[in-house]
Image: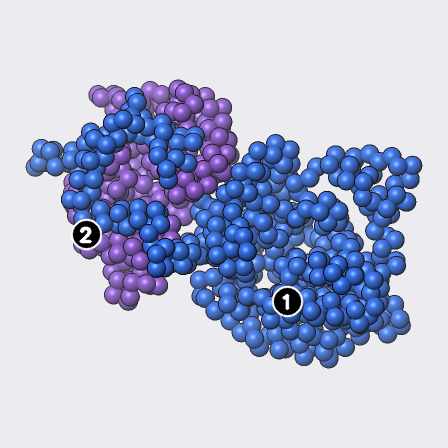
Chain colours: A blue, B purple
Amino acid sequence: MTALDFTARARTSLRDSQLRRNIAKATSTIRAKTARVAGELPDWEALRDAGQAIKRQTMAELDRHLVALEASVTAAGGVVHWARDAAEARTIIVGLARQYQAGSVIKIKSMTTDEVELNPALSAAGITPYETDLADMIVQMAKEKPSHLLVPAIHKNRAEIRDLFLRELDPAAIPGGRLDADPSSLAKAARAHLRAKFLSTKVAISGANFAIAETGSVVIVESEGNGRMCLTLPDVLISIMGVEKVLPKWEHLEVFLQLLPRSATGERMNPYTSVWTGNRAAEARAGDGPQVFHLVLLDNGRSKILADEVTRDTLNCIRCSRCLNVCPVYERAGGHAYDSMYQGPIGAIVTPQLRGFEEAGSLPFASTLCGACQEACPVRIPIPNILTHLRAKVVAEKRQGLGALNGENLAMQAAKAMFDHPTLLAMALAAGRIGQAPLVRDGRVTHLPPPLSGWSLSRDFPALPPESFRDWWAKREPRS
Amino acid sequence: MKISLFITCFNDALFPQTGQAVVNVLERLGCEVEFREAQTCCGQMHHNSGYQKEAIDLVRRFVEVFEGAEAIVVPSTSCTAMIRSQYPRLAKAAGGEALAARVEAIAPRVFEFSEFLIDRLGLEDVGAYYPHKVVYHSSCNSLRALKLGDRALRLLRNVKGLELVELARAEECCGFGGTFAVKNAETSTAMLTDKMRHVLDSGAEICTAGDNSCLMHIGGGLSRQQTGVRTVHLAEILASTDQAAS
């Protein structure tokens, strides 16, 4: 296992001028739109409170709600599977696809399938997965990874997508082999390409935005309608969801169907909201639409997140991606720096909890703790507090045994000793004033030695002044 | 009113002139200022970097030093935010009931400098004179953790001779973030570059804020690029009068 190095990955993205421009442009557009449509609701803050409260109450009794969901889905003719981890989820889904003799599957809206690395497992079993969400399809064709929760191809502009389509789309989808880079031409070509898949593929795999325990209904919200195609055309529908997606009651959906689109795309309502309940719909009985419905409930580390009362709120995320769009680090470092299907501030707390600190321990540090994410989050997840909590866990792991000899820990212990003993601090400052002499020019230090050299990459450091504040205070005339 | 100054370790060592300015302003306004010499650091660096055990000790130290003070004034938005937003949580989680109760008692008496002038002294005009073109950087902690709003701007608008100009994307972080600036130096620099562009576009000669850590970052970049724009803490602007303009 190689450790995920955010710093190094960001370094690469920072130099990609096309990427920087694409992301800055896209996030500033979405930022303005979401701020406008969130701001226009007089009860927006109350909706956020409600969203947070419903999620917190649900998590407090998650076990009960999941059992209720299983019962409702089963009663409606669906089959529920429980997956403890990624491997179990893969085994279940690949097994089902085999059982239904699928040579290929169409997929929609599932970051969870990315999380469990389903596509490679399907391919290995001889089953070709086709992503049908436009941006997911683009990312899949380009053999890249998504760089944004909601706009997975945000790093690509129209010209880049046009070139990709010319290379990768079914030639029948591009009559005459001529394709313009305007959105409607690109959409037309993609539609022709995907339509053929929708009509010929018998098994679909989807994610879920919400699942309602009391009714057994599963909900997907989307903008394109490709999800609706996947959910209604094939004979077999397999949906996978993280256990945290359950909502106890149908009435709770109302809150999230307002919070989600307004926070995500800046739309008052998303164009397509699909809700299905088992396979008992009249259409299914009449032979139209999925005859068989499977629901996979995935834990994969979520129980552990739930068990810690600080990190618990991580699970309240509705994947709107608003925190990415307001994050100054995400805007510059880009989504690929997070090396995960979950990027930005939410990725910085989710990924290390799913993949462990040894692998993803750099992510909690990929933040200035500026708080823009928490301020924007529709369900008020205290991301900065969770980040510092995770940092403490990373540090605790790192300084076990001989790890305590790492430079940062030694520096932190030295600083602590000085803060415990002001006289030591005064002595250190006096020594520093002498020691800094070779580095100071015109009252500034322009080159710092490692490990502080990162600072002087782009910034001068002020030289220690001849006296500290407390020196000045001590010498001051007493006031009457 | 007797005010206890929490200078913060950072200002004590690197920016003594900010502390002197705070004393100057408060005494000019008729307050008595004391300095408790056992004070050191609020623990923010340790807390934000993941050194929770060390941070808790520093919480305890702060409480022991400042217990009983009538009002504690802090010329740093991030240290104020550490004390007010993080101490109660930290104390509850790791310091025991007794420490939590002592923190609860002390936290409401901790004021960021501009907040103290406006909310406790009820002043927006402190009689300052500063004939310069100035742009104000609202630190993330001022904006989001402390929700200080336009307090600093109200004080600046009342400074004689001062021309206040607007900063584009004022709500965005400068990219400092403590050890972030060192660990993720390139990303931090990318944020700083944009912040500096907005500062330079404003046409100001001085960039001010209520926190010297943001200012050391922005100022360090402005200095490296030889922009000719300086950073000055808000307290130093407010300390300047037509008797002794700095």
Q: Residues within 10 Å of mark 2 (few under 14, many from 20)?
A: some
Q: Secondary structure at mark 1?
A: helix
User: Foreground: A300 or A121?
Assistant: A121
Q: Quadrant of residue B54?
A: bottom left
| x 49%, y 24%: residue | B201
**Quarter where residue A469 is shown:** top left
Where residue B181 sits in the image (x, y, percent)? 42, 39
Residue A28, percent from left and from top: 60, 38
Res. B37 in view: yes
Quarter of the image where the C terminus of chain B is located: top left
Q: Which element is circle 2 on?
A: helix
Chain hosting mark 1:
A
Q: Residue at x 82, y 34 (%)?
A: A180
Q: Is residue A138 left or right of residue A330?
A: right
Judge left or right: residue A319 versus residue B30. right
Q: Which residue is mark 2?
A: B65
